[in-house]
Image (spheres, rainbow, N blue to C red):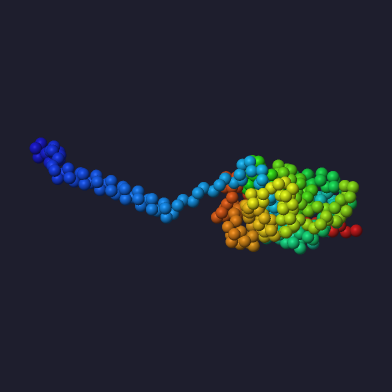
Amino acid sequence: MAALGWLTPRRRSATARSVLAGEASAEAARKTSQELEALDDLVAAASPEEPDEPEFPVFGDDKAAAFFDLDNTVMQGAAIFHFGRGLYKRKFFERQELARFAWQQAWFRLAGVEDPEHMQDARDSALSIVKGHRVAELMSIGEEIYDEYMAERIWPGTRALAQAHLDAGQKVWLVTAAPVETATIIARRLGLTGALGTVAESVDGVYTGKLVGEPLHGPAKAEAVRALASAEGLDLGRCAAYSDSHNDIPMLSLVGHPYAINPDAKLRKHARERDWRLRDYRTGRKAAKVGIPAAAGVGAIAGGTAAAIALHRRRH
């Protein structure tokens, strides 16, 4: 057994040299720790953490509101084309009138942007078709058309953004070139405050086939938002606006919180240059800068858009 003695440490009192070694080791450990702490402080001073982004929308801010474009922002496709499909189903115009404009909706679906000439043609057609019909009749039909063709085409992500504003106690408005009656139906179905849209002239509750002013498009949207903000006592610097189209840059530039949703190429470029927030629901991608992450992440992309039917002038 004596041969195994070397495996067992011998008990012996600490020498002066071992005490010195232990004290030196402890001192070195303390010094190293202090140096690391100092280095961390220097790094933190050189690269301070960015403060958390303020909560948005701000709860209870009654001077703020949100303005949402409709076509391809809140809803896949153009509302006027979906409305036209419903009118065709109800024999407001004949089958032979479909061919000329059927390609417009297919183009819209592929490009994802508005073409002013196409949209103007469709609006002129719509005015011709509704001329002589009662406003109440078209509103009732519009309710049915929403259920048939529009409800399933609402972008869940954009809907969640709008709900975040509502939950914060803010008003939320649609701003669209679509007829104000159609826009109002959609706003009500989504639980929004209301809608700004193109106003068709009516006399004694009957459409005349003319517009009041011009379509609510481009700069006209910005003017509508400005007028509403003035009437509602809103601070536009605290308001938000959402759109997919470069045509709405005037409206987006008017508010303190502009958002590019499913943006076309021109709006995407403009937004990136100005550090606006981006979100694209068409592919499920998140852009580099996103707004209201918790709310915007709700839901997947809504069901695919079926081919809708464009409007054409009623032939007499």
Q: Quadrant of the C terminus?
A: bottom right
Q: Is residue 155 visible?
A: no
In the picture, residue 114 is in which quadrant? bottom right
Of all residues, the one furthest to the left in this rendering is: 2
In the picture, residue 269 is in which quadrant? bottom right
Find residue 174 and report its horizontal and vertical position in percent: 72, 49
Judge left or right: residue 199 versus residue 251.
right
Q: Which residue is located at x 81 percent, y 57 percent?
A: 213
Total residue callouts: 0
Q: Which residue is located at x 29 percent, y 49 percent?
A: 32
Q: Is residue 229 visible?
A: yes
Q: Which residue is located at x 37 percent, y 50 percent?
A: 40
Residue situated in front as seen by the camera: 161 or 102: 161
Find residue 104 and report its horizontal and vertical position in percent: 74, 60
Residue situated in front as seen by the camera: 297 or 98: 297
Judge left or right: residue 62 versus residue 118.
left
Q: Quadrant of the N terminus?
A: top left
Residue situated in front as seen by the camera: 124 or 192: 192
Q: Which residue is located at x 75 percent, y 57 percent?
A: 220
Find residue 176 and report its horizontal and vertical position in percent: 73, 53
